[in-house]
Amino acid sequence: MGTPLGDFIRAKRDSIQPESLGLRDHGRRRSPGLRRTDVATRAGVSVEYLTRIEQGRDRSPSVAVVNALADALSLDSAERAHLRYLAKITGGECVHGARPAPARRDVRPAVLETLRLLEPGIALVTNRLGDVLAHTGGFASMMEASGLLETDAPNLTRYLFTDPRARTFFADWDAVADEQVFDLWLGPSVENAEWFRAELEPVAGADFTRRFDRHVVPQRGVLRIDHPAAQELRFHRETFELATDAQQLVVFLPADERTAHSVERFRLRPPGRLRAVT
């Protein structure tokens, strides 16, 4: 049985062309990318040891080995951070099957007050599972046509993969889906992510499973929304980590003048719709 660490190393190895690292192309192969021999040589480990890591038979490589593998695969800073995180959780034990303690859903009064100060701006409090825990009236106005907030406990990840409206509302649906699935690896806990994956996979299908297994670190560029009342909206997103709560405050900032004008129209709607989702 593989591990998240082994899956990531193998997926990354398969995605790299030898010539991009100045290595000789050995011709047609059964699988794409780098050979284990190439990576093992660059990392200074044996092929047998690399095979054990990829196959999940060695779950506790040293920090030096993890760093050497990051160098061998030419990982960028975000990918290195993800590799170190996977090494950490792979060495521990995950709870499988049983529902773990649910992720925290209450939002501290100070965070709710921060949301009030951001009105009539567009902001929400969420967690890495995609639960929408609280939001401003501006966020509700923008998302009204999407269907995201129609449920009692809205979850962006579940919405993306199970509601057909998401694929037209988000102009770059693939990129947003990549972001949400990748974030499952980041918490609120490994157990929560494992349980959520098991719950979502049967209804989300191959689009979800493929992303979860690829471990592609998303770029998180401009968010484009095809809003039926305002044509295309473009937003920069600023994310503030609420580390003690395992939650994030996300603020949407217009990325161009047309979006700013459209947001201004949203702000003319009746105020006072700040909502904590319980």
Image (tube, rainbow, N blue to C red):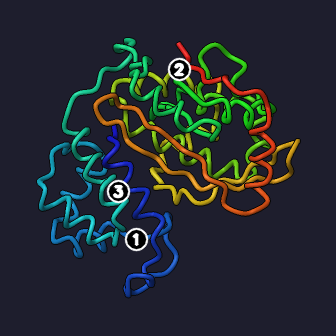
Q: What residue is drawn where x is 59% and y is 20%?
A: 275
Residue at which label 1 appears: 34
Checking the image for residue 199, the label placed there is 2
Q: Amino acid at mark 3?
A: Ile
Q: Position of residue 140 (x, y in %)?
A: 69, 30
Pointer 1 and pointer 2: residues touching (CB < 8 Å)?
Answer: no
Q: Is residue 160 visible?
A: no
Residue flagged by tag 2: what amino acid is it?
Glu
- Local packing at callout 1 (Cα closer than 10 Å; few below 14, some 14-19, many 20+) is many
Residue 46 at x, y percent in the picture = 17, 65
Residue at (65% x, 37% y) in the render: 120
Q: Residues within 10 Å of mark 2 (few under 14, many from 20)?
A: some
Please give left or right for residue 225 compared with residue 91 in the image. Answer: right
Amino acid at pointer 1: Leu
Q: Where is mark 3, residue-wise? A: 9
How far separated are the C-alphas under marks 3 and 2? 26 Å
Using the image as rendered, state which of residue 261 and residue 77 is in the foreground: 261
Asked whether, in this view, residue 61 is left or right of residue 230, the answer is left
Q: Are marks 1 and 3 in contact (CB under 8 Å)?
A: no
